[in-house]
Image (spheres, rainbow, N blue to C red):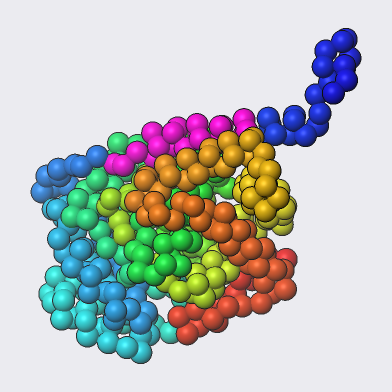
Amino acid sequence: MGPGPWGYPAVSRELIFDWALTWLFLAQLALIFWNQRVLARPLARLWEDDSPLVSLLVPARNEEATIERCLRSLLTQDYPRLEIIVLDDGSTDATASVVRAVGGSRVRLLAGTPLPAGWTGKNWACHQLSQAARGDLLCFVDADTTLAPGALSAATGLLEEEGAGLVSLLPRSSRKSVSGAVLLPMVPHAMFALFPMAAMHRSTHPSVAVAFGPFLLLTREAYAAAGGHAARPDSIVDDVEMSRAVKAAGYPVRLANGSDLVETRWYETPGDIWRGFSKNAYGGVGYSPWMAAAVVLVLMPVLLLPFFRVGVGLVGGDIPAVALWQVALLLSGRMLTAHLGRDPQWTTPLHPFMVAFWGLALAWSAMLSATHRSVVWRDREVPTRPVELP
């Protein structure tokens, strides 16, 4: 390499690029440690008998396989004042019978009314639940979700301490399949490794908000000010839209790591995972073609490049040392987020397959939305974009 300007050795573009990537991955590792503090698990809290009434609200459609575990976990909450309401959203299985058998007089079962035009099924179910609720606080819990006994007490304490309008807990995924164990850890990994959560908490801009549907706790005041689920009745990503609406109404939104408090059974088979996130992924980036393009065409290749270089080096017998360091940094970050999300560590070496899968899922979701196509979910046709978007 010859001398550069002013007599210093010239630096190749490749070397500059390698150093830039290495520092980027070091920064990502630092971000994970910082987010670990920002998203710290809420502390246990003991409440008096005069604490605010919390309405635990469960929308259920064909959930006979999961609703029993959900209800039993709700019935064992140590929070002193709560009501539990389940809405049977036109189930064709034994969901209602299971609710009656498990809940008895301690659970109020509602029969959902037919789905109106312009509403998604979950939004309509949650809207009906909110109207039936008597609580000062509304807690929406998915029917395939279970809570540790202190989950509601801890989340309610965080809501009060932060003066928030909405608190959502990052759940751990219930993994009964290899595909779920390999692919679903992307959710906590993205939260800890890709988003500056402190900035998201401080920002008052509505677009800078996120939440997780399995557990949403809101004050009734914030829910009403945000327009409730009626504000965006056709939204596919109801949890994210609710967090943005609450922040737009002037209320803080807080996210915490609830991996030891909340467990949800998202998807199991590769097909279910693909379909589930095909309907949600594009909405998760705000239906922004620029954001989707940045993730698919820039972020995903950057995160996969070191693994590709190591793979090519294994075939050719010459592995770049810098690529090994970069892979080590990326896998170290993945090990940390797996620990924080209580995901299996044996999937860490499969990290590049997970990243590639989610990048492709986002690209497919954006394509479905751009072509106004729908996906079938829970025996209903679900659009991949709100109807009012162009």
Image quadrant assignment for residue 95? bottom left
* Residue 301 in sight from this viewpoint: no
- Residue 161 is situated, as x and y percent measured from the top left of the image, at 30, 36
Q: Residue at x 60, y 65 (%)?
A: 361
- Residue 85 is situated, as x and y percent measured from the top left of the image, at 25, 70
Image quadrant assignment for residue 184? bottom left
Magenta part of the protein: which range?
22-42
Q: Residue at x 37, y 60 (%)?
A: 173
Q: Quadrant of the C terminus?
A: bottom right
Q: Is residue 259 above or below residue 270?
A: above
Q: Nearer the viewer, residue 242 or 8?
A: 8
Q: Is residue 209 magenta?
A: no
Q: Is residue 25 magenta?
A: yes
Residue furthest left in the image:
49
Q: Residue at x 87, y 10 (%)?
A: 7
Give the main secondary structure, helix, strand or loop, of the magenta stretch.
helix
Residue furthest top in the image:
6
Query: Is residue 248 found left or right of 71 in the rendered image?
Result: right
Q: Nearer the viewer, residue 384 or 322?
A: 322
Q: Quadrant of the N terminus?
A: top right
Q: Count the labels in the image.
A: 0
Q: Is residue 82 above or below residue 94?
A: above
Residue furthest front in the image:
317
- Residue 303 is situated, as x and y percent measured from the top left of the image, at 62, 47
Q: Residue at x 63, y 35 (%)?
A: 321
- Residue 133 is situated, as x and y percent measured from the top left of the image, at 28, 65
* Residue 11 in sight from this viewpoint: yes
Q: Is residue 71 above or below residue 90?
A: above
